[in-house]
Amino acid sequence: MIIRRVETFANEHAGFVRVIDDAGRQGWGQVSTYHSDITAQVLHRQVAPYVLGVDCTDLDDLLDLVTEREHKFPGSYLRRAMGGFDTAVWDLRGKIAGKPVAELLGGSAGKIRAYASSMKRDITPKDEAERLKRLAGEQGFTAFKMRAGAEVGRGQDEWPGRTEEIIPTMRRELGPDVDLLIDANSCYSPAQAIEVGRMLEAEGFCHFEEPCPYWELEQTKQVTDALDIDVTGGEQDCDLPTWRRMIEMRAVDIVQPDVSYLGGICRTLRVVRMAEEAGLPVTPHCANHSMVTLFTMHLLRAIPNAGKYLEFSIEGPAYYPWQEGLYVESPYAIEDGHATVSDAPGWGVEIHPEWLERAEFRVSGV
């Protein structure tokens, strides 16, 4: 398979990628969200020159070539751009084979249990509990994630006492039978995180995400070693040697790669295999309703060490107005607390033409 043309349609918040091969067949993917217009430029400047007009049957090796040729730029923007190309090629492969990507990966279409993931900190514990209970009744969720501390908060809470209140409130209001997860978004020192972790354990929480600054793996490992609750992390990490070190030192109990931040399906599968060898489950990060959640759904239907659930953002247009109008038909219906991977070829989704018309268009190739 030879890609002759790479197109991007992007704005600040989202960016879609279309690849066209030498037979005129098309596949759609996505660069990572946020500053997607910048990432699209990186894709055309630093990825397209190495992937156009060459055989991409061995996509993993081709992406390694991009990494080597752009070795002076090992960071997040390049990986986010690579992910746009990777995911578009996987869609093209699925369409050529007439199979969903999940099946190409060795899995199948079908259902995945989801947890309702709150992105909000500007909400009282009481109001958060009320909206999560409503979702349990309307969509059947049996697992929920809320927020502790302040995002990269240097040890400070969103407001004094919020974390100490939300932990018991969630268990009391949601009941004894649901799974409760919480995300600190790099807020705490190890000592603070362990203190919060003890409160979580007392209330039967099962997942404590990114308790310390995510780049400080030794700090996170202190928390993991001290607590019985599963400590999780990895969403921001896009460097494979960092992933190898994180897993080898067992800094976390559950790994959480983000397909789009990491650079696509191929690179995520490498992390999956590292984790599998170490006996660690994979519960990827996918915190919005761009295509990243769809990528993750297909991945979870295929990998042997998939975690218990799919992260599913519960934030609508009031929080993420840019999510509106992305698709002709949304792939994100939740029934009885489960999302469904369809058996449609590729990713099984169509980007809305009106959204594409409004986006900034760039093209590389002929």
Image (spheres, rainbow, N blue to C red):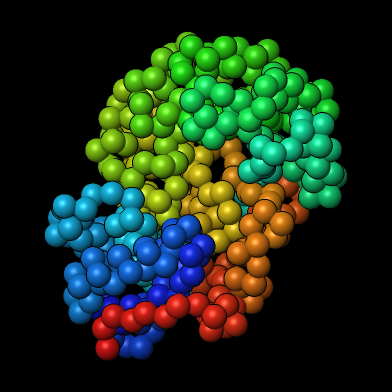
Which residue is found at the position 41% from the left and 32% from the top?
214
Q: Where in the figure is residue 171, as x and y percent of width and height? A: 77, 24
Q: Residue at x 73, y 47 (%)?
A: 337
Count of numbered circles on the image: 0
Q: Residue 64, position in %: x, y?
A: 20, 56
Q: Against 182, is 256 above or below? A: below
Q: Is residue 144 left or right of residue 172?
A: left
Q: Position of residue 2 (x, y in %)?
A: 25, 78
Is residue 304 toward the left or the right of residue 204 in the image?
Answer: left
Rendered-image quadrant of the N terminus = bottom left
User: Quick check: 21 above or below 57?
Assistant: below
Q: Is residue 220 visible?
A: yes
Residue that appears at 63% across and 30% down: 158
The answer to which image quadrant residue 140 occupies is top right
Task: For the C terminus, give its image quadrant.
Answer: bottom left
270, 360: nearer the viewer: 360
Is 38 rendered above or below residue 360?
above
Q: Is residue 166 above or below residue 289?
A: above
| Residue 209 visible to the viewer | no
Of residues 137 and 359, which is closer to you in this image? 359
Location of residue 174 (image quadrant): top right
Q: In percent of the image, x 51 and y 62: which residue is there?
A: 13
Give percent across and percent down for residue 19.
Answer: 36, 77
